[in-house]
Amino acid sequence: MKALRGGYCRKIILTFTVLLYFLAGFLLTGCWDRRELNEAAFVLGAAIDKKKDKKIELTVQVLIPRAAGGGQQGAGGGGGGGGSTPQVLVRSAIGENVADAASKLQEKFPRRIFWGHCETYIIGEKLAKEEGVREQIDFLLRHPEPRERAYLYVSHGKAADVLELKPPLERYSGEVLRRLIEMRIGVKVTVKDFEQMVTGDAGGALLPLIKILPQKHGEKKQETIAYMAGTAIFKKDKMVGQIDDKVTRGLLWLRNQTQETTITVNPRKGETISLNPVRDATKLIPEIENRKWNITVNVSAEGTILQNGSDLDIMSPEITKRVEKYAEKDIKRRIDRALKQVKEGMDVDAFGFADAFHRKYPKEWEKVKDHWEDVLPQVNVKMDVKVHVVRSGMSTTPAGLTEEEVKKR
């Protein structure tokens, strides 16, 4: 009798288990939004320009699958842009806004456009200055496919022209821009970063400014590359000015974003010493005293000597201290240029001063946040810069000079 009961219980348990697995299958979701690779057109770069009657021209750079998989490779077998097989296809469409232009652009592709792989968005200078970029950024943030971590740029001239370039080292122009920005050649701003800057306390924003390298004699325009030419300055979502590469370096020191930079000083006329910061940090220290708003830019850097074009012995502690002082003056000069051109010339807080005051003095900030542009010109900026040379390089004496010719002081 017990054996019969045991067998009956096992049958019930088995039946219940099978039924449970069967019911669980209905709860499992499938890949309802799956998209096959051979059904998608992968956008690698996009450009947005202003046309007549406030219309928008959207240009995309789309990967050609056959070229990417089995096309000819460039020099060295690296699959670069030097091969004869095109790597990308460039197409444009005009619409009332980016979304409308994108829908019209879809009519020109036999595959569904996919934005998830796009890492480069270029805004035309005319659009940035005359209309602003708020509506375009809204599309990139609202649409489910574009990446918030994609990089934003402003082009000198028409943005679509950059996508037409055929760089000799990389597969397409968007990849050139991505590599430059990741090396911190200029300011590094993503779609999300820009949106946060525009809606932040300061209301000032910035984007890397790119230009097309002038073509050499006998070279086709499409065979050149785009390069970082400075920074576009925005007040809210409109471009109000630009600064060149030299002033951008001072801006990067203020924003604590320096990386690929070299400081060259002149101990005497015709002589140079170059050093590269290996570690640096910038802190903004705000202070309100007697109703006066002050902020101290505290910069500390450690560097190594890259080249000694003088007859000075950089191994000498006395000479090293002189080089450090020269470097400190150079950094101060760069920061001062950025402050004069952006803070004073454009009346824009692109440095994060507002955020620094808001964090330390929240009550005082509440009183001025609605008219910060009136307070900003009155903010007194002090600089405290310290540079320390930690290595003098691989050589002790300057090349071509004997120990007797080297000056110790």
Image (cartoon, rainbow, N blue to C red):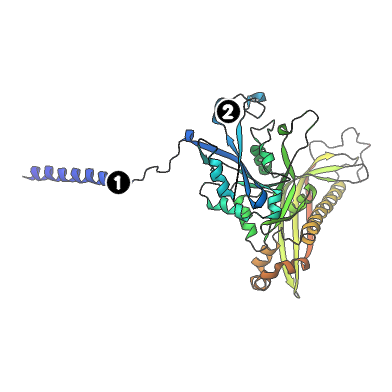
- Image mark count: 2
Residue 257 appears in the picture as rendered: no
Residue 40 appears in the picture as rendered: yes
Which label lies toward us, 2 or 1?
A: 2
Q: Position of residue 70 (x, y in %)?
A: 56, 25
Q: Secondary structure at mark 1?
A: helix
In the image, what residue occupies the spot 9% across and 42% down? 3
- Tell which of 182 and 312 is nearer to you: 182
Q: Which disc, if any, is residue 283? A: none
In the image, what residue occupies the spot 37% across and 43% down? 30
**Circle 1: residue type:** Phe
Residue 8 occupies which quadrant of the picture?
top left
Q: Disc 2 designates what residue?
A: 67
Crowd rating for badge 2 (residues with CA inside 10 Å; few <14, some 14–19, many 20+):
some
Mark earlier in primary sequence (2, 1): 1
**With 102 as the anchor, is 248 left or right in this view?**
right
Q: Disc 1 designates what residue?
A: 26
**With 11 as the anchor, is 57 left or right in this view?**
right
- Dividing the image into 4 quarters, which one contains the N terminus? top left
- Tell which of 279 and 27 is nearer to you: 27
